[in-house]
Image: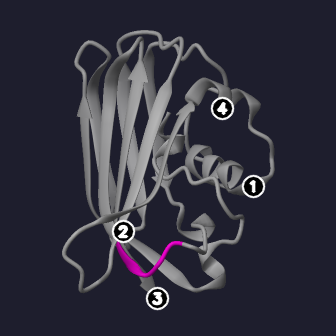
């Protein structure tokens, strides 16, 4: 589910070729209490480039729809501007993901320390994602800027998890 926090499906060129660093300053999660309880969303210290998510699903999720909006603001800018937005079928992505492209690289970085199910339906129970880091697979088109990522997850036509991340992309 959280594989889509920064799901970008453009270029496979990564930020490491440009020597960029990603630092998160805030990580806000909001849940629908009919779907999720006992949740935690944290930026991992001290580097602030990784994330931890833990949540207890109260219901089985037969389908997952995901809307992602990624916005940037220049270092001296006042407002965020849309860089990328996308809606997708989360169950289709996790079950049919090929091993090519940026989406696979992001997915692999998210689930490497996770008990993320590989198919839908997603059974109710505890799910964790530890040390999620997309710094090395961040697409090269992401500019040095302030970054805001908003991801809304839907099941049964109801939002069950809303995530807002703020941080910055910096030159190394």
Q: Earlier in the sequence, mark 3 or mark 2?
A: 2
Image disc number at residue 101: 1
Q: Quadrant of residue 11?
A: bottom right
Label 2 residue SS: strand
**Which residue is tagged 3?**
171
Return the x and y of residue 86 as percentages of the image width and height: 51, 44
Kindly identify the residue that appears in the image at 53 percent across and 16 percent down.
63
In the image, residue 144 lies in the stretch drawn in magenta: yes
Q: Nearer the viewer, mark 1 or mark 4?
A: 1
Return the x and y of residue 69 as percentages of the image width and height: 40, 50
Distance from Cα at disc 4 to Cα at disc 3: 32 Å
- The boundaries of the magenta stretch are 142-146
Residue reaching furthest to the right: 99
Q: Earlier in the sequence, mark 2 or mark 1?
A: 2
Return the x and y of residue 26 as percentages of the image width and height: 24, 59
**Which residue is tagged 2?**
72
- Other-residue count near label 4 (Cα within 10 Å), few / some / many at <14 / 14–19 / ≥20: some
Distance from Cα at disc 3 to Cα at disc 2: 15 Å
- Which of the pair 96/25 is nearer the observer? 96
């Amino acid at each position: 589910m959280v594989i889509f926090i920064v799901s970008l499906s453009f270029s496979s060129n990564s930020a490491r070729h440009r020597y960029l660093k990603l630092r998160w300053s805030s990580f806000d999660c909001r849940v629908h209490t009919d779907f999720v309880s006992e949740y935690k969303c944290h930026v991992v210290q001290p580097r602030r480039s990784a994330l931890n998510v833990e949540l207890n699903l109260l219901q089985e999720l037969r389908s997952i729809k995901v809307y992602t909006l990624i916005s940037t603001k220049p270092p001296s800018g006042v407002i965020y501007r849309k860089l990328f937005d996308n809606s997708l079928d989360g169950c289709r992505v996790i079950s049919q993901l090929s091993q090519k492209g940026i989406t696979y690289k992001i997915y692999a970085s998210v689930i490497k320390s996770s008990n993320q199910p590989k198919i839908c339906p997603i059974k109710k129970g505890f799910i964790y994602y530890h040390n999620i880091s997309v710094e090395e697979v961040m697409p090269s088109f992401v500019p040095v800027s302030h970054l805001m990522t908003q991801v809304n997850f839907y099941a049964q036509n109801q939002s069950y998890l809303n995530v807002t991340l703020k941080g910055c992309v910096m030159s190394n």
